[in-house]
Image (cartoon, helix red, strand yellow):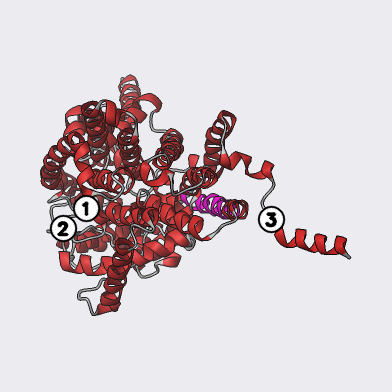
């Protein structure tokens, strides 16, 4: 009987079940072997989930980078270095110089940068976990889990596919590289031993980030948040300790803001003079977009390369006031609970800070874009993981759950890259999800035309012409594409009518006059030659009218005139392969004709 009682007492005193020691050893004290495996795992996973995108084509705006007169192809260093994103364009020029125009190598650089960013983020989080504000709050196992899980979720989330798979969005990835490097330098031991060296190195990385994409101008704010929460332990007076960094970055930020505003104030896709979008409309709409972004980060499926967003012209329209109220409650809550939940508060504030440049009062052409979440996603994942670590006591179970999420994310990213690897699949996907957006239909038509599916392309362009706003530059572009689709189907009369309609909107378009000239010559109407001349008068430096007219001359047997046009194209664009090849053909024809004379 006594033995039975002792057995019951022993069972009552037994501690709660713990995960096996072997299962938690890595979490508690990661080894050098773990670090090596983690680095290798990042590259293996990164290339596994982005493998399909490596063989993807140039998409959407990518073609502008390598257009025959672009600064990238001409290596015009003055234009590259004085543009709004000189380091980004320099990276494209370097890509072109080393590997030509093969999109594989452009995609390869983007995937490598994404993997590199994952590793830099890993180092940043590890340094954060060693700061006074975190080292006492988290157990060794929690610190290791946080440092591994955050970068891996960042790496594998499907929300990153646009930033990585779309070559022009390298701006997001490259800016994040230097943004994270600056944070890493600030968190290093240099900060106390060599404060001015830290400040200057961080300033160099800051300049590189901003010259990759202007939204990185928020870096001083991110450093301030990091200092306040984790180094100064939420004591404002202790921020003075790092005054050299703030002094240098403050001056650089003021200078950069002035330069950036001068560069972007009149660009066609952004600014306070953006046609049809006021700063108020953009701001009221963005209140709703924050919740769209939070949903996409939490459940990154149903993604869309071109969202069709209905604008809010007032706070009452589309419940923008409710979104604003929700944002204020969220911000108020994290600020109020910042001492209790420092890591959560930091993550939320980092999310809002890094999203602010694209999602506030400065109008952009698109109301929403997944690429804008590349850097802000770090704050979201950090806040989410901090909440889970706070509420989920069993670290082994949490690690397994996060592993399952990582697996789902990886599969989702792999599947999403099927779309980004094929231009037609991409715009079919967009047209299905945004059926009333003219750009989706127009780009779908372009992809169908490239594949010789001209009848389907015509229907897509006709739909785009119905949806596009009237009497604007975009309307003229759509009509130009529609006219070309008619011409591809040898419907030259319809093409001519459509080109004339477009010229009523954009009478000084050399492209439209060139296309009209081609269509008229195809109809055996000599007036087409005058249209070519009109295009040349409008833009004497345009190579397209000369190349098109040269082709028409060649087909008409007017060899000498064709030769002159091809030679002019090569004067304007020395590397134009088509003009060089056609010139050789014309010269051979002229030689044969001369040899056949009596």
Is there CB contact under 8 Å for labels 2 and 1? yes
Is there CB contact under 8 Å for labels 3 and 1? no
Left of 259 or right of it: where is 185?
Answer: right
Q: Give the vertical position of 295 relative to 314 (above or below).
A: above
The total number of labels drawn is 3
Residue range of the region highlighted in magenta in the rendering:
404-421
Q: Give the vertical position of 32 relative to 56 (above or below).
A: above
Q: Residues within 10 Å of mark 3 (few under 14, many from 20)?
A: few
Mark 3 / mark 2, whichever is N-terminal: 3
Image quarter hosting the C terminus: top left
Image quarter hosting the N terminus: bottom right
- Tell me the tag on residue 506: 2
- Tell me the tag on residue 473: none
Q: Which residue is mark 1?
A: 512
User: Most prominent secondary structure in the magenta stretch?
Assistant: helix
Q: Residue at x 23, y 63 (%)?
A: 475
Residue 325 visible to the viewer: yes
Q: Residue at x 23, y 43 (%)?
A: 238
* C-alpha separation, residue under disc 3 versus residue under disc 1: 76 Å
């Amino acid at each position: 009987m006594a033995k039975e009682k002792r057995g019951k007492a022993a069972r009552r005193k037994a501690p709660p079940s713990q995960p096996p020691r072997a299962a938690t050893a890595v979490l508690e004290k990661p080894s050098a072997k773990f670090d090596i495996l983690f680095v290798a795992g990042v590259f293996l996973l990164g290339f596994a989930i982005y493998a399909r995108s490596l063989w993807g084509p140039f998409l959407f705006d990518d073609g502008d980078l390598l257009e025959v007169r672009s600064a990238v192809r001409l290596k015009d260093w003055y234009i590259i270095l004085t543009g709004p994103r000189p380091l980004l364009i320099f990276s494209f020029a370097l890509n072109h110089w080393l590997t030509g125009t093969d999109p594989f190598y452009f995609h390869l650089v983007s995937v490598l940068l994404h993997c590199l960013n994952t590793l830099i983020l890993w180092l940043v989080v590890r340094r954060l976990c060693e700061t006074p504000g975190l080292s006492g709050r988290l157990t060794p196992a929690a610190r290791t889990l946080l440092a591994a899980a955050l970068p891996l979720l960042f790496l594998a989330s499907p929300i990153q596919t646009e930033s990585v798979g779309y070559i022009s969005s390298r701006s997001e990835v490259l800016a994040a590289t230097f943004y994270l490097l600056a944070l890493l330098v600030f968190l290093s031991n240099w900060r106390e031993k060599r404060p001015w060296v830290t400040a200057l190195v961080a300033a160099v990385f800051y300049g590189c980030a901003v010259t990759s994409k202007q939204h990185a101008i928020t870096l001083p704010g991110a450093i301030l948040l990091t200092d306040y929460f984790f180094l100064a332990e939420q004591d404002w007076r202790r921020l003075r300790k790092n005054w050299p960094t703030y002094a240098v970055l403050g001056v650089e930020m003021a200078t950069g803001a002035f330069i950036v505003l001068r560069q972007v104030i009149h660009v066609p896709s952004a600014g306070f003079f953006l046609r049809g979008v006021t700063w108020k409309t953009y701001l009221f709409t963005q209140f709703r977009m924050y919740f769209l972004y939070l949903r996409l980060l939490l459940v990154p499926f149903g993604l869309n390369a071109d969202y069709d967003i209905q604008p809010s012209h007032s706070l009452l329209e589309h419940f923008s006031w409710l979104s604003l109220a929700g944002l204020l409650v969220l911000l108020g809550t994290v600020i109020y609970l910042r001492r209790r939940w420092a890591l959560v508060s930091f993550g939320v504030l980092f999310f809002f800070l890094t999203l602010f440049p694209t999602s506030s009062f400065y109008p952009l052409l698109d109301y929403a874009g997944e690429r804008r979440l590349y850097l802000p996603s770090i704050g979201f994942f950090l806040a989410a993981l901090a909440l889970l670590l706070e509420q989920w006591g069993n670290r082994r179970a949490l690690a397994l759950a996060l592993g399952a999420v990582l697996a789902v994310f990886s599969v989702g990213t792999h599947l999403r890259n099927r779309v980004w690897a094929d231009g037609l699949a991409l715009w079919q996907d967009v047209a299905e999800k945004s059926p009333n957006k003219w750009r989706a239909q127009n780009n779908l038509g372009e992809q169908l035309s490239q594949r010789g599916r001209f009848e389907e392309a015509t229907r897509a362009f006709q739909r785009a012409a119905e949806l596009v706003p009237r009497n604007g530059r975009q309307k003229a572009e759509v009509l130009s594409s529609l006219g070309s689709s008619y011409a591809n189907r040898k419907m030259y009369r319809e093409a001519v009518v459509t080109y004339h309609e477009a010229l009523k909107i954009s009478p000084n378009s050399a492209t439209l006059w060139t296309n009209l000239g081609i269509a008229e010559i195809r109809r055996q109407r000599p007036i087409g030659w005058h249209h070519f001349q009109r295009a040349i008068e409008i833009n004497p430096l345009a190579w397209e009218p000369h190349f098109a007219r040269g082709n028409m001359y060649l087909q008409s047997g007017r060899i000498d005139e064709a030769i002159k046009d091809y030679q002019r194209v090569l004067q304007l664009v020395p590397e134009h392969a088509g003009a060089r090849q056609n010139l050789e053909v014309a010269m051979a024809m002229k030689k044969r004709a001369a040899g056949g004379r009596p």
